[in-house]
Image (tube, rainbow, N blue to C red):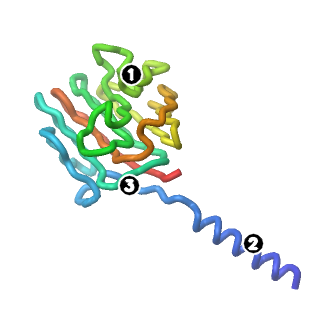
Amino acid sequence: MKYIKLVAFLCITLIMACSKTKKTQKLFVENDTQWKTIGDANWSFVKGELKGVADSSMGFIVTKSVYSNFELNLEFKPDSTVNSGVFVRCNNDAISAAGCYEINIWDLHPNQDNRTGAIVTRQKPFKKVETLNQWNTYKIICKDNVIKAWVNNVLTAELIDDQHIEGKIALQAFETGIIWFRNISITPL
C-alpha cells in the first residue's frame, strides 16, 4: 500500500511539474495572423525563411502580443549594406531605440559602439562578432530588469535597466539591403 501511495504521489508531482513548464512558441511564421508590418520595407517568406528588403526605406515586422520575461532565439543573415536589429519590449508601434531595447545587427555601423551585438545607445558590445553574409544566431534573454544578448554563443551585451518592462517584439530592415531571419522562437521565463 505504501508503494502505491508513493507511485501515485510521484505521478501527481510529475504531472504538476509538466503543467507548469513554459512552452516555446514560434514567432513570425508565414500565414500567421499574430504579427503585422509597419513602414516601407518589403517583408516576404522564401522557403520558410523571412526576408526583409530595404530600398532607402525602413520597416518592421512586429508581434501583436506583448512579452515581458522571455528567451528569444533566432537565426539571421545580413548582407553588407543593411541596417537591421531585434527590438524587444516595445511600448507601441513607434519602434525606436528609445521606445524599445534595440539589439543591433549592423557590423559596419559608423559608431562601433552600436554595432552587431550592442543594445543601441545603452550598451556597447563586449566583443565584436563578424556576421556579414552568413547565418548567425541571436539569443536574447529579458528577465525582470536584465537584458542579455549572445551572438553565435558569445555574450555581447548585458544591461540592467527598468525603463521597459514589457512590450512587443520587432525585426527591422533599414536603409538599403537584405536581411534574412529563420527559426525564430520565444520561451516565456
Whether residue 81 is situated above or below residue 33 in the rendered picture: above
Q: Quadrant of residue 4?
A: bottom right
Left/right placement of residue 7 relative to residue 120 reads right
On residue 10, the disc is 2
Circle on res. 130: 1
Upstream in sequence: badge 1 or badge 3: 3
Q: Nearer the viewer, residue 50 or 124?
A: 124
Q: Nearer the viewer, mark 1 or mark 2?
A: 2
Question: Where is residue 29 shown, x and y percent of the image?
Answer: 29, 54
Tell me whether the residue at label 1 lies in contact with that at label 2, contact meaning CB atoms closer than 8 angstroms. Answer: no
**Mark 2 or mark 3, which is nearer the start of the sequence?**
2
| Residue type beneath disc 1 | Glu
Q: Quadrant of residue 51?
A: top left
Secondary structure at badge 3 equals strand
**Mark 1 or 3, closer to the camera:** 3
Query: Closer to the N terminus: mark 1 or mark 2?
Result: 2
